[in-house]
Amino acid sequence: MIKFLDLQKINAQHAGELKQVAGEVIDSGWFLLGERVKTFEQQFCNYIGTKHTIACANGLDALRLILKAYKELGCMQEGDEIIVPANTYIATILSITDNRLKPVLIEPDIRTFNLDISLIEQAITSKTKAILVVHLYGRTCWSEELENIAKKYQLKVIEDNAQAVGAYFFYADGTKKRTGNLGEAAGNSFYPGKNLGALGDSGAVTTNDDQLATVVRALANYGSQEKYVNQYQGLNSRMDEIQAAFLSVKLKYLDAENEIRRKIAEYYLENGKNEQIVFPIPAEHRESHVQHVFVVQTKNRDQLQSFLTAHDIQTLIHYPIPPHKQQCYKEWNSLSFPVTEKIHREVVSLPISPVMSEEEIQKVTQVLCAYRS
Ligand SMILES: *Cc1c(COP(=O)(O)O)cnc(C)c1O
């Protein structure tokens, strides 16, 4: 069986170091708000390029905390609108509705699966306060046009960087910046299956905004900056010391692991030839994609998935039901987003990970080529 993502094997590569630091945390007797979280935050700042990293409990909380902080700062209030892709994982949308803000869903570009930036301007109203972009599947969703729209209408741009830690955006002048450092603030996820995965839940907010960073940090710790003094009605959303210690180990290998993912994606693109399967178009710059998931499209998706399963290849669907069709958002169930719905009907994600063997990569490719609907 070729696993979609072999987490056991991924972490086994670093088992010695991971067990070492786990032992150190156990022996230290210090489990929260300690030196290991501080160290990881500094390392992540150096990696992403932002002035601040605020570690928190998970990626959803990172996004929730950003929006909650903007409300505390008076930049947004209940009922304000946030522009967001219709084609995303539910967590992006939950972070908005949890704050009683209103998601304004925008269709993706079918070629990149990412928010179609050319549709943003027509969706802006007097209530629009921010654009929440998602670097879906690990592909950077950014452009200088997006920056200009945000400037023109004085909107915050927030990044959902859960799937794209390590990716870059390249400016026309040749300079580059990491995702997570492109907008005003970003939510990052270290869910075990993400490219930088902890051994449990954790996440982080990255930002260059001093004021926002201070409020997010307080909100993540009961709304308190000083013990037993509560300025805000906050949450308990902190990263464990043991997860920070694991992440400091794994961050060192992230670039190399993302590069292996890119090589696998390139192999699939070069060698996977099948007229019934639509392969993703390569990113303009290879480093603006970290290949979190490799998604192909086909009319008869369930049949392709069964064919792959019959050949011992495990696949997943990212994602089977779009947010606007979910029961939890009944009020949007009748809305129509044809591009988003087509994607949800037709995509299947192939195995991709830093621990796939050459034989496994070849086999997946051969089976793809052999498929006939
Ligand atoms: C994983 C993910 C999240 C949420 O991260 P968690 O750490 O699982 O809470 C948010 N948005 C996207 C696009 C994700 O893939």
Image (tube, rainbow, N blue to C red):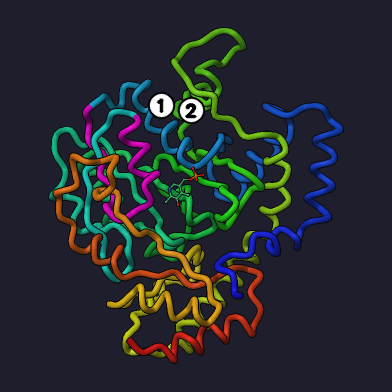
Span colored in magenta: 79-98
Please state, as top left, top right, bottom left or bottom right, where the N terminus lies in the image. Answer: bottom right
- Is mark 1 in CB contact (under 8 Å) with mark 2? yes
Q: Would you identify the image quadrant in which residue 77 lies? A: top left
| Residue located at (38% from left, 51% from top) | 89
Assign a secondary structure to mark 2: helix
Residue 68, position as x, y percentages in the image: 39, 27
Magenta span includes 82: yes
Determine the image quadrant of residue 344: bottom left
Q: Identify residue type, mark 2.
A: Val
Task: Look at label 1 and name its amino acid.
Answer: Ala
Residue at position x 73%, y 29% from top? 31
Of 200 and 307, the residue lying toward us:
307
The label number, if any, that marks residue 69 in the structure image: 1
Q: From the viewer's side, name the closer residue of 288 and 228.
A: 228
Q: Residue at x 37, y 65 (%)?
A: 172
Density class for disc 2 (Cα within 10 Å; few <14, some 14-19, many ≥20) is: many
- Reading the image, the residue beneath label 2 is 216
Q: Quadrant of residue 194?
A: bottom right
